[in-house]
Structure formats: structure tokens, C-alpha cells
Image (cartoon, helix red, strand yellow):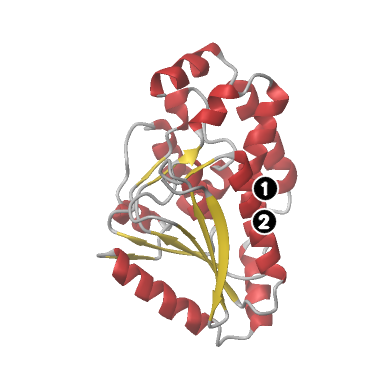
Amino acid sequence: MSDPYVKQTIENEVGYIEFFHPSHNSLPGNVLAKLANTIKEAGQNDAIKVIVLRSGGDRTFCAGASFNELINISDEETGKVFFTGFANVINAMRKCPKFIIGRVQGKTVGGGVGLASATDYCMATKFASIKLSELNVGIGPFVVGPAVQRKLGLSGMSQIAIDANSFYSAEWAKDKGLYAQVFESTEALDEGVKAFSEHLCTYNPEAMRDMKTMFWSGTENWDNLLADRAAISGRLVLSEFTKETLKRFK
């Protein structure tokens, strides 16, 4: 089994940020922190014009929050700190002055749907179904909710948030606006991401920066909003319902 990591490579002015965890690319606090910092640094790196966010492995893009960490949360402040990790990544993506292209090769759950939603343009395979599973364990998609709602609309977000036990297909996600393009295979996806990202690098960086600011207009309160949402999740994760449910999942 490989160790968790976050790494960045640069190729033809495209910065590829990749995260990995052996447990289906789940996201513990240390990986979230490294991911947020790497995105911030890439946004300030003049050698990078466009960013691609991807995960390691062939199957799951992201399984969301680390259940091992959730089970070990014993007080509200610790819970808030953990969920703030997701808030920090989403806010780093929101504030990054460069377009972030999502590369989603497989299923994505919970917080992973939030990451995909926070990209500026997302490309996926036909295997990249999505699920907001938080209600299943007694919490709710509070922190990632604003990012998901921004892409899927309130109707789409509430549908998958309430139907927390179902995967929704990549085509459904494309129809709702989460995915811009859906490919038949990972190989085709990678070719598409590379060509699209490198072509973006030929555009005016200043124009792209101003466009990104325009696209994210109205989210200026997310630093406070997502912090408040993290506190809600930090409280709910201590509920008896959630504690018992997490033990069964484990």
C-alpha cells in the first residue's frame, strides 16, 4: 500500500496537483491541509498558467472524509477543525487566481463532490458517478453544500443530499452542470484534460484571472459561511446517532 501524498508537477505551463490516499482517496486532516497549501502556492507560481486537480489511482476520485478521523473526534472544537480542512481547500480553490480544471476518473463521494464542484471546469469519465453520503452517517453536506449548490443548483444538490444512499451517474452530473465533458475511458480523459489545459495556457492570463473573479462573484462571504458550516458538522459528528453509525461503517 502506498503512503498518502499531495504532489505537484508542472508540464507545459500546466500545474498538476495530485492527491492520494490508499483508502479510496479519502481525505484526512493532514492531506487536506497540504492540498490547500499546494493550491495556494500554485496560484502564486508564475511558471503555472492553469491548474489541474486530480487524484491518484484508477478507480475512485475521492471517498470524502476519513472515517478513521471522524470516529476519533471527541469534542466540538476538534470536529470543527477537521471539517474546516474541507472549507480551507474549497476557499483556496475559490480564491486561486488561475482556472482549476478538475479531472475525475471515477466515483466521488461527499467531500470529493465538493472538490469537483469547486473546480472551474470539470472533466470526467463515464464511471465518475457521485454521491452525497453525509446524511447516511448523521451529518449532512454542510461545508461542501455551497460549492455543490453553485454547480448543481439547489434542486440538484438537495436531491442527492436527501437521497444519500444513491450514486448518480456521470451523465446526470453533466446534465446538471457539474461535468463539462464526459469521456469513455481514463485514457481519453487524460488526453482531453491535457489538450484543453494546454490550450488554455495560450490565453491572456490577466483575462482568465478577471473571468475567474467574475465567475465566483457573490461568494465573498464563504470564509465565514464555511467556518460556520464546519461548526455544525463538528457538533453533529458527536451525536450518538453518528457515533454508532460510524462504528458500523468501520
Q: Total label count? A: 2
Quarter of the image for the C terminus: give it. top left
Query: Which residue extends farthest front?
Result: 1
State whether residue 13 appears in this view: yes
Q: Which mark is residue 92?
A: 2
- Residue that label 1 marks: 88
Question: Residue 52 location in percent, x, y?
Answer: 52, 67
Residue 233 picture quarter? top right
State whether residue 94 appears in this view: no
Q: CA distance from mark 1 to mark 2?
A: 6 Å
- Name the residue nearer the viewer: 57 or 225: 57
Are the residues flagged by discs 1 and 2 in contact, CB closer than 8 Å? yes
Query: Which residue extends farthest left?
Result: 184
At label 1, the amino acid type is: Asn
Which residue is pictured at 73% across the width and 46% down the height?
223
In the image, 75: left or right of 187?
Answer: right
Q: Secondary structure at mark 2?
A: helix
Which residue is pictured at 57% across the width and 86% down the height?
203
Which residue is pictured at 54% across the width and 23% down the height?
71
Question: Residue 63 location in percent, x, y?
Answer: 43, 42
- 64 lies above or below 237: below
Residue 202 picture quarter? bottom right
In the image, 203: left or right of 189?
Answer: right
Query: Which residue extends farthest top?
Result: 240
In the image, 92: left or right of 53?
Answer: right
Which residue is pictured at 71% across the width and 38% down the height?
227
Q: Which mark is residue 34?
A: none
In the image, 22: left or right of 28?
Answer: left
